[in-house]
Image (tube, rainbow, N blue to C red):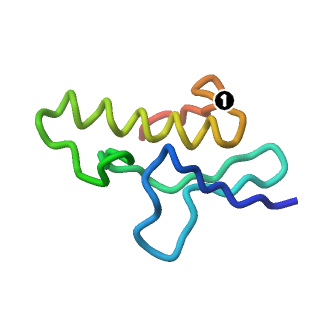
Amino acid sequence: MKKVINYKNAPAPIGPYSQAILKNDTLYASGQIAINPSTNELVLDSIEDETTQVMENVKSVLEAANMDFSNLVNFPSF
């Protein structure tokens, strides 16, 4: 079964796509940028703040699918 994930605590999609799709036990997530979902503005103060916002957005999408960072698969670099 396929479930569309759209979560208010993560930035709304800008284009015609979803934040993520849950199919069986696999979550297919779109890329995240450093948009603060509360203000709908980019966080560009520093690379640290930008990275923190991106990771918070990823965390929100994972939570909407009842997942967390431990569910991520790490692919080796080539």
Left or right of 40, for residue 43: left
Left or right of 26, for residue 45: left
Give the number of marks. Answer: 1
> Is label 1 in a helix, a strand or a loop?
helix
Which residue was labeled with disc 1?
Answer: 71
Q: Residues within 10 Å of mark 1 (few under 14, many from 20)?
A: few
Quadrant showing the N terminus: bottom right
Quadrant for residue 36, please give it.
top left
Residue 2: x %, y % from top left: 81, 61
Q: Nearer the viewer, residue 7 or 34?
A: 7
**Most distant residue in the bottom direction:** 16
**Most distant residue in the left direction:** 45
What type is the residue that disc 1 sits on?
Asn
Quadrant showing the C terminus: top left
The residue under the point 54% across, 70% down is 17
Q: Is residue 32 above or below residue 4?
A: above
The residue under the point 50% across, 43% down is 9
Residue 70: x %, y % from top left: 63, 23
**Most distant residue in the right direction:** 1
Q: Is residue 35 above or below residue 58?
A: below
Q: Is residue 55 above or below residue 29?
A: above
The residue under the point 30% across, 45% down is 34
Residue 20: x %, y % from top left: 61, 55
**Most distant residue in the front direction:** 38
